[in-house]
Image: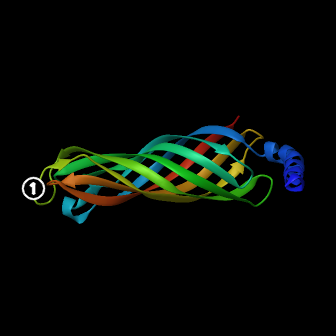
């Protein structure tokens, strides 16, 4: 048992400087465009995209793995008789594949709570629209560029599941968010 503990302590002491070099807290802002897939029961869409803003923060465990929190707009929709919007709060694991010292690919997988708010109106059948929340898997892909030692620029796509109530029945829909982010590493 002492040999195992000694080996574990030695490996931790050797790995700690390398681990510290690629790890730490980060935070950033996002700007993008969201495209919403409006459920058929809501009627023909007259608008299903929107400019969205958000914030992101997380902890980079090493050069390949991070845990991240995100809050972002997930888009607006409008039909002839109603409209609504969605905002998402997500928790994800982010895996990064470095391609060089400056570029990398990343993928995100986690869960998001999306708040669907009905601004006005009715569905295609005349039933009133109301707010609904949906918790669903969220995922995304993108590329990142290390602009400086402390600043990354990301270009990405994220998929969120959202909902709105129509006559008391939750109508699920999806939102695709295409964004650019500036991330500062502390």
Label 1 Cα crowd, 10 Å radius (few <14 / some 14-19 / many 20+): some
At x 71% / y 34%, what residue is drawn? 186
Q: Is residue 48 left or right of residue 179?
A: left
Residue 97 visible to an observer of this rendering: yes
Q: Residue furthest left?
A: 126
Secondary element at image label 1 = loop
At x 90% / y 49%, what residue is drawn? 10
Q: Is residue 131 left or right of residue 142?
A: left
Name which quarter of the figure residue 20 lies in: top right
Q: Is residue 64 left or right of residue 49?
A: right
Circle 1 residue: 126
Q: Position of residue 84 (x, y in %)?
A: 27, 47
At x 48% / y 48%, what residue is drawn? 90
Which quadrant: the N terminus?
Answer: bottom right
Question: In front here: 139 or 102?
Answer: 139
Q: Position of residue 163 (x, y in %)?
A: 30, 54
């Amino acid at each position: 048992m002492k040999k195992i503990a000694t080996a574990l302590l030695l490996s931790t002491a050797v790995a700690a400087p390398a681990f510290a070099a690629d790890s730490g807290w980060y935070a950033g802002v996002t700007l993008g465009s969201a495209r919403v897939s409006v459920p058929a029961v809501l009627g023909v869409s007259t608008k299903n995209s929107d400019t969205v803003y958000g914030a992101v923060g997380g902890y980079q465990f090493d050069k390949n793995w991070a845990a991240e929190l995100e809050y972002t707009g997930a888009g607006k929709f409008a039909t002839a008789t109603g409209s609504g919007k969605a905002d998402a709060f997500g928790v994800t694991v982010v895996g990064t594949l470095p391609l060089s010292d400056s570029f990398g690919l990343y993928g995100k997988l986690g869960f998001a709570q999306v708040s669907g708010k009905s601004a006005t109106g009715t569905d295609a059948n005349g039933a009133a629209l109301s707010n609904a929340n949906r918790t669903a898997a969220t995922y995304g892909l993108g590329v990142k560029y290390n602009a400086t030692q402390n600043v990354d620029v990301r270009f990405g796509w994220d998929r969120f599941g959202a909902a709105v109530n129509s006559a008391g029945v939750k109508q699920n829909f999806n939102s695709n968010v295409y964004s650019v982010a500036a991330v500062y590493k502390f």
